[in-house]
Image (cartoon, rainbow, N blue to C red):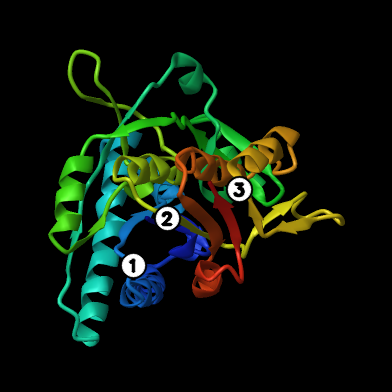
Amino acid sequence: MVAIGGNMLITEPKSATYEKQWKKSQSTAKLIVDLYEKGYDLVITHGNGPQVGNLLLQQQGAEVPSLPLRILTAMTQTQIGVMLQHCLINEFRKREIQKEVVVIPTSVEVNLTQEMIDNPTKPVGPFLSDEDYEKVKDTAKFKKFQKGWRRLVPSPRPLSIMEYKTIDYLINDNTLVIAVGGGGTPVTLNGGIQAQDGVIDKDRASAVLADQLDADLLLILTNVDSVYKNFGEEDQEEIKSMTPEEAKDLIQSGALGVGTMLPKVEACVTFCKQSGRRAIITSDTKVLEALEGQAGTSIIS
């Protein structure tokens, strides 16, 4: 299971043209096919935080009826997924490899509470200046970070991937599957399926899917090479490997802060609850080294 961060496809959300995203998707496709050629049987997932945030901003300035977040989440699954699919197909053909690639828009069962709706926690979209924030501050909840303001949306924890049996079937049929885009579309099943407004953390959703598929390895790609204790501080310390128990202690100590690394480590702990499993957190430039234990952070059960 390879979980690709949304920031790997968009570096600067406000200037992220289609052409720039296409080039980033091409480089990501090359990396994925490199892994395939090394003998890994892969499933691909990806984030959507920058992309869904941009769509939310576009909705606010449109002179047409706006769409709910649940639909924008679904839209980004295909927006990003199809772009990756086309780049992967091109890369496989370039290397004369026969491989089918499909995108599965994914629904993820969650337990969304009123508390999560009233107090959203997940930041999405670009950082806004004070001036831009003043224009939209009454439309949603925002939080100020060092780089500016970001919109907050509910982020319920994933319970189950509804399409996992279809994904498993396709994997066994020699198909490379792109699924759980942006964490998937959150749904509840009380009295029938109902899509909910929110953005599920894609690493947590990836861990759930990897568990349902009984994967051996969860590979989380981000914009830093390893997990660091007290990241950004003078006493920051790179962590090369740890057990799930050590990772739990690190989480509880608060040494990971409240940034995006926390849910990644939590996802790895969830996945590694069964013995014999391994999770790796690293950057796209260190993947091959990390797989050989020479870079990144490994969590081994």
Q: Nearer the viewer, residue 290 or 233?
A: 290
* Separation of residues labelled 1 and 3 (CA atoms): 25 Å
Is disc 3 surrounded by few (<14), some (14 to 19) or many (20+) residues within 10 Å?
Answer: many
Neighbour class for label 2 at 10 Å: few (<14), some, many (≥20)?
A: many
- Secondary structure, mark 1, is loop
Q: Amino acid at mark 1?
A: Tyr
Residue 278's place in the image compared with 63, above or below, is: below
Mark 3: amino acid: Met
Total numbered labels placed on residues in the image: 3
Q: Which residue is mark 2?
A: 217
Contact? badges 1 and 2 (CB < 8 Å): yes
Compare marks 1 and 2 and give the one earlier in the sequence. Answer: 1
The Cα atoms of the two marked residues, 2 and 3, are separated by: 18 Å
Residue that label 1 marks: 40
What residue is shown at x 28% (from left), y 50% (from top)? 179
Q: Nearer the viewer, mark 2 or mark 3?
A: 2
236 with respect to 220 (left or right): right
Q: Residue at x 37, y 55 (%)?
A: 1
- Residue 261 circle label: 3
The answer for how far apart the CA atoms under marks 1 and 2 are is 10 Å
Q: Residue 161 vs residue 300: left or right?
A: left
User: Residue 274 location, x and y as percent?
Assistant: 45, 40
- Give the residue at x 60% y 64%: 296
- The disc, 2 or 3, on the residue closer to the chain's N-terminal end is 2
Q: Position of residue 106 (x, y in %)?
A: 25, 42
